[in-house]
Amino acid sequence: MMDGREEGARLRVVFMGTPDFAVPSLRAIAGEPGEFELVLVATGRDKPRRNRRSEPEPTPVKCVARELGVPVMEVEDVREPRFASTVARYRPDVIVVAAFRILPPEVYSIARLGAFNLHASLLPRYRGAAPVNWALINGDRETGVTTFFLQKKVDTGTIIMQERTSIGPRENAYDLAGRLSVIGAGVVVETLRRIARGSAETVMQDESLATRAPKLTPENTRIDWVQPVDAICDFVRGLAPRPSAWALFEHKKVRIFEALPASFHLHEQDEQAMVPGSIALSKNRLYVMGIDGWVEILSLQMEGKRAMAAADFCCGFRCDDDAPAFS
């Protein structure tokens, strides 16, 4: 296979990304100035990030791009013709995408040597918007990252590289995404090197193994207490800290951030009278029943209040029901 660049020439790279997950990859590319020339960074527009009433703030990627002195283009609509024409003006050899938008062919086909995406799963598992979350929710013990060439159908392109990693038993979505972003940065750099050398061998995805990682919504992030304890705890950590798993208590929303299986038992007669979701308090500790035991809730946030440790919830606990429960 022929080399992807002229001898001594640096690979011209356009980078596209928005959140924290993309930042290590951007820094890693910038950290190899002898090999790669970052000519443009595309990212989302400034918007309120702390809450709806806060002042607009730049994306994490924009902040780093400005620090690096790389030209930045803020993008609202990737199908707007001006976006494609701007990217074309920078004559990229490669377009690198990490946690950005779904690019149309008229954009990703601009790059002379192709455009590839960094995805936070071992494709074809967990195609979609929330691969880290669903790997944890489903109780997987292993995950990883994949780089693949873009094509029209989302997350289906040919695989260039993958790297695997074990999932820690108490790792939540935030922690795992952070680790994968660092692992992914190394994979992105090696992928660029293979493309530059013309040695980027690819593998087709096996469609029979494909699974989905749909967008997280209020409907699919509510806790179902009629589940085994381990499944409930995986669900909580798979959504922590944001958007967070949630339940209702006295008709108010409760966000739950941390939960563990508990070695806890009531008197047999009392326990038999309880149903999944039932609450028990003991020594300032908060327990909720699943179908095969108890979950200990370690931190949570009541609607309209600050996040708190479960012990603080227990101290202020008041309930209008003789059989308090989350639903």
Image (cartoon, helix red, strand yellow):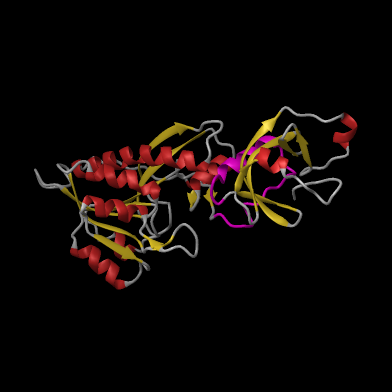
Asked if 23 appears above or below 106 in the picture, the reply is: above
Give the residue at the far top of this rendering.
263
* Residue drawn 35% across the image and 59% down it: 58
Q: Which residues are magenta?
A: 216-243
* Residue drawn 53% across the image and 41% down it: 135
Please check the rendered image and state whether residue 225 is part of the magenta-colored stretch, yes or no.
Answer: yes
Decide if residue 254 is on the left or right side of residue 126. Answer: right
Asked if 234 appears above or below 23 in the picture, the reply is: above
Q: Is 284 or 300 nearer to us in this picture?
A: 284
Q: Is 35 or 33 nearer to us in this picture?
A: 33
Q: Residue 179: give x, y in percent of width and height.
A: 42, 37
Decide if residue 211 is on the left or right side of residue 223. Answer: left
Image quarter hosting the N terminus: top left
The quadrant where residue 95 appears: bottom left
Please check the rendered image and state whether residue 54 is part of the magenta-colored stretch, yes or no.
Answer: no
Q: Is 151 or 8 nearer to us in this picture?
A: 8
Give the residue at the far bottom of this rendering.
81
Q: Is 63 or 94 nearer to us in this picture?
A: 63
Q: Residue 101: give x, y in percent of width and height.
A: 39, 59
Q: Residue 44: give x, y in percent of width and height.
A: 36, 61
Q: Main secondary structure of the magenta part?
A: loop
Asked if 58 appears above or below 298 in the picture, the reply is: below
